Each structure stands twice: as structure tokens, then as C-alpha cells.
Amino acid sequence: MKFTHKEAYINGQWITKNSTFGVTNPFDNSEIAQVADCDRNDAKIAIEAAHQAFQSWRKLTAGKRSKILKKWYQLQIENVEALAQLLTIEQGKPLAEARGEIKYGASFVEWFAEEARRLYGDVIPGHGSDKRITVIKQAIGVVGAITPWNFPNAMITRKVAPALAAGCTVVIKPSDLTPLSALALAELAEQAGFPPGVFNIITCKNPIDIGEELTTNPLVKKISFTGSTRVGKLLLKQSADQVKKVSLELGGNAPFIVFDDADIDAAVDGCMASKFRNAGQTCVCTNRIFVHEKIRKEFTDKLSAKIKTLKLGNGLEEGVVIGPMIHEKAIDKTEKLLEDAVSKGATIRLGGTKREGLFFQPTLVCDVHPTMRIFKEEIFGPVAAVYSFQTEAEVIQLANDTEFGLAAYFYGKDYAQIWRVSEALEYGMVGINTGMISTTVAPFGGIKESGFGREGSKYGMDDFVNIKYMCWGGVELG
């Protein structure tokens, strides 16, 4: 099908606004659409609609909610190509990656449609002979979901599917850079049969007022945010006055460690998959590549050869692996990080230059050390920075020397070392001999300033429910 809506979606209605904002294709900066520019009052209306819808949605049986979610999943699978084309046009990633994101995003809907039936409680042995203890889980209420531009489909489904499965209703504020993918999901949600008010999309150019309304409106009981650590801290502060439940998936600074006994070819492939997916614009991208001194030359030679094969261009063209970056600021940051590194002794072995438009040449920079900005800051671009190390203790200290703690990767064959390193790395997720860790069935999330809360897996509904303990007295057997 063709997705055509550019309006906001509130209480089952497509809402036009006199004020709109433009959405552009990062490949050529051409305008794709003018989208409704909502204000704080629109957010209040959406929240009220979600609150009213919650009263009946939470009372539906898990089976009925599951049936609607499954229909939503089926519609996404039936429309993979159209959704992927739209995603590539507004976000820039290659079409093959976009298709992968649509299927990945849909997998969360399928998973939580099934998990809706498994929101189990407990019976606990009582503390007295006349006491019985039961525990139930109840939907928390209206959920405010704020999602980023780098995965404009999957970051919505990963948050919304468990919320809806638990019996919550949602108000979604997508990125102003990629609102069309969100509106396409709303079209499919409408077709799937979600009642009015259960699923709402607020599009806007300026997110500050909308974010403040979501975090301070007492009808919103939960905030789920994926984005920068700076914005996450602000949302957390705004939510604190009401002690609102919050989940944050924030920035990363992922280490990628290659020990001297590693399968070097496999490590290079894993590094390529982790580093250059979405032009390096993912929160779990490899950021700092630590290679044992004994194998540094062989690893970097092979990595360089692989990087040279990456094709830049329009994501809709066959064979393109690296699309444009999202905006000029992203390129400026990448250039400044490289300038700082070179000024402090780093060597650009490959790439390092901006291309026409929003393209940045895939880059390999060597002789990097911890005094450089590129060690401390998330790159969010197609730049592979290689460091060398000699001992296990040294590399663990270097890998943990960051305020972030989202994802980490390492390659090696010594199983005793694998256990030691896995336990020592201060990260929420660790890839061992793999550069690809994201999956529906595992808990996604970080520690330290990378946030808290988990998305996906059997743990994914925990943040959308309240646990209620019920003590039954006067039931002693005669």
C-alpha cells in the first residue's frame, strides 16, 4: 500500500494543522512532505484521549489485545517493502538495512502479542497461618514514548508493543526528522483495529513543549525515551516531581576488543557489521576498537581492505552500503573529532573526508589514544578508530573508562578469559565473538549514563506494569 498521511493521529482521527514543517530526504535535501506541527495543547488532547481509552483498553482480555497486536504485525509484514522505501527516503539508510529494520520492528509486535497472555502473577506462602499472599501485575496507564531518527520504525514498536500488550495506551512523539515512518505505523494500527485513543502520534518541529507536557502531565504515568544522554537527563529531571516511571536508552561508547588468540577474519567481519551499519549512526555501534599489539597490523590491514569496498550513495540504489548522514551537524562533529585526533598524533589511514551532500567517506584512523576526544565521545559516524593494547587488565580498564555503559564487544577463544572479561565489562550488553547483538528475545538496555530499563525479551513488559501485592487475612483452616 501507499502511505499518504501527513497529519497527526489523535484519538483515532487524522488531525490537520495550519502550521506544518518540512521533511527532507538526506540524500539530496529534497522535500518529501509537509507534516502537521503540533503544539502543547495537541499533546494535552492526545494525553486525555489516551487516558480515556485506557479505562476500557486495560479491561480487554489479554487474548483480545493479543489478536489486535497480531493483526498489526501481519499488516507490517505485508507492507515491508513500502515501509522500507519510506524509511530509506526520509532517513537515508540503504534499502536492505531498511527492510531489516521493518522486520526487526515487527518482530517486537509479534513477540509481545504473545507475551500479553503471559503477564503472570504469583502466589507466595503467607507469613501467618491465617494469611495468603497473591501478586498481580497491572497496566501502569498512559505511556509517553519519545523516539529517535536513526531507527524510526523499530524504536516505536520496541516501546509501544509491550505497552499495548500490558494494557497501556500510548502517546508517541517521533523525531521531526523522520515522522513519516511513525505515521505509517499509525495507518496500519488504525487498520488493525486499535480503538480510538489507544495509539496516538504527535508530530512537531520543536520537541521541548511536547516533551515537557509528557513529563509533567499527571495523566502520563510512564516515559520511555531513546536518544541522547543530555536530553534523557532533562526528561528524567522533569519527571521527578511526580516520581513518574521512566525508561531511558541513551548514548553509548562501545568498545570492540580483539585479543591475540581471536579469529582475525571473523573479528574484522564483526567489526564491519557493528561499526558501519546505518553509516555508524547507531547507539550500539563500535566506537573504540582495541586490538592486541601482536595482531594489530594484520587486523588493520584486513579492516582497511574491507572498508575500501563500501559503496556510498542513494540508499534506494542496488549495492549501496553507506547512505548519507542525517544532517550537517553530524558531519561537522565527525570532522572535529578527526581534527582533534590528528592534532594529537593519530593517523588517518583511509578516508577522513566529506563528500558532496551529507556523505562522509568511511574512515580508518590509527594510533589513537585516550587523551583524544574520539576516545571519550560517541562518534555516530562511519569512522573506525583503532587503539592497541598489551594486557587483559589494561584493555578492561580502557574499555570501562567512560561514563557510558550500553554495549561492548570482544573476540577471543580462551573460555576462562571470556568469562573474566564478560563479567568485568561495565556494560548492559556484551557481544562475544559477534558484532550483532540486537534481537527481540534478549533484553536491550544499558547501565551508567547509558540509561536504565530493558526493551524486548520476557523482561520487556516489566516497565509498563505495576506490581500489586494482596494480603488475604482470616483464611486459617479450621
Image (cartoon, rainbow, N blue to C red):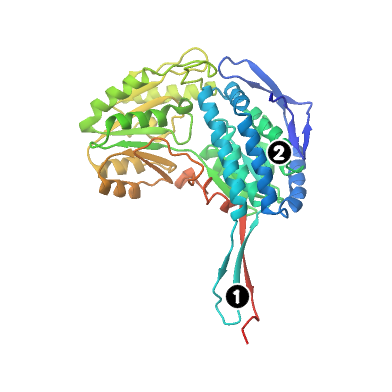
In the rendered image, which quarter contains the C terminus? bottom right
**Residue located 60% across and 25% down the image:** 81
Crowd tier of the residue under label 1, counting other residues whose Cα lies within 10 Å: few below 14, some 14–19, many 20 or above:
some
Q: Which mark is residue 178?
A: none
Quadrant in which the N terminus is drawn: top right
Taking the spot 38% from the left edge, 17% from the top edge, the residue there is 309
**Secondary structure type for disc 2:** helix
Specify the label residue 192 is tagged with: 2
- The reply to whether residue 267 is visible in this rendering is yes
Residue 319: give x, y in percent of width and height.
Answer: 47, 17
Q: Position of residue 346 (x, y in %)?
A: 31, 24
Please state if 142 lies on the left or on the right of 448 as rendered.
right
Q: For numbered disc 1, what is the local secondary structure?
A: strand
Q: Position of residue 226 (x, y in %)?
A: 55, 39
Looking at this view, name the residue that lies furthest to the left.
294
What residue does disc 1 label?
Answer: 132
**Residue placed at 78% from the left, 28% from the top?**
17
Above or below, comparing residue 257 to residue 112 in the picture: above
Residue under the point 76% across and 48% down: 53
Q: Is residue 237 visible?
A: no
* Discs 1, 2 touching: Cβ within 8 Å: no
List the single residue furthest toward the top: 356
Question: Mark 1 or 2 closer to N-term?
Answer: 1
The image quarter containing residue 2 is: top right
Judged by depth in the image, the label closer to the viewer, 1 or 2, is 2
Query: From the viewer's perspective, is residue 167 above or below residue 293?
Result: below
Q: Nearer the viewer, residue 29 or 461?
A: 461
Residue type at mark 1?
Arg
